Amino acid sequence: MTTEVSSNTLQPPEPDTHLVLLEERAPDAATAVANAWKSYRPNWNRPLKVAMDLPAREGWSVRKQFIYETSPNERAVVVAVAFRAGDTWTVLLADGTEPTFEKRGAQVNLIVESLRPKGFVSLLPIGGAPAYSGAH
């Protein structure tokens, strides 16, 4: 059983692209992403091109990216990334056009890389510089 907890939609000035953040309770990333797409677009149905595990980091215990098939003529970008912390998945859906993602790529990357679980506290020392042990 999966229930939607909350959602937020981010839209650049271009109306052809959306980033949607949803929180889902689900047993795994694939289920969380499938339910997120159903919440965002109930009739959505694209074949999955590739799913890949991403390293756990910044408070996320599991991260997984899903890239979907698009035709060359569409010039579309359709991606989902699932982030798990505790028993909740945060799902980012990216749905838009290549030209907009090419133009707004830095901003989108900043959003993705800035996501943190609720209550996460970075373990950086005072001053913000990461501590290194010297071992590689």
Image: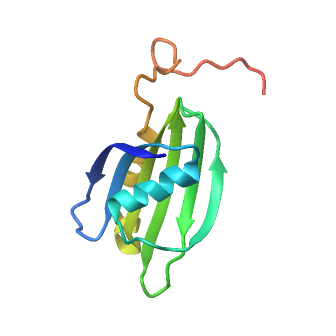
Q: Does 26 sit above or below residue 49?
A: above
Q: Position of residue 104 (x, y in %)?
A: 35, 60
Q: Does 45 sit above or below residue 74?
A: above
Could you say which is closer to the camera, residue 72 or residue 39? 39
Q: How many marks do you count on the picture? A: 0
Q: Residue at x 39, y 61 (%)?
A: 38
Residue 105 in view here:
no
Q: Position of residue 128 (x, y in %)?
A: 47, 20
Q: Residue at x 42, y 38 (%)?
A: 114
Quadrant showing the C terminus: top right
Residue furthest out toward the top: 126
The part of the image, by quadrant, that contains residue 12 is bottom left
Residue 73 in view here:
yes
Q: Position of residue 15 (x, y in %)?
A: 23, 68
The part of the image, by quadrant, that contains residue 117 is top left
| Scheme of colours in the image | rainbow
Could you say which is closer to the camera, residue 101 or residue 31? 31
The part of the image, by quadrant, that contains residue 24 is top left
Q: Residue at x 40, y 45 (%)?
A: 3
Residue furthest out toward the right: 136
Q: Does 86 sit above or below residue 128?
A: below
Horizontally, residue 6 falls left or right of residue 31, namely left
Q: Position of residue 2 (x, y in %)?
A: 46, 46
Residue furthest out toward the front: 1
Q: Residue at x 49, y 50 (%)?
A: 32
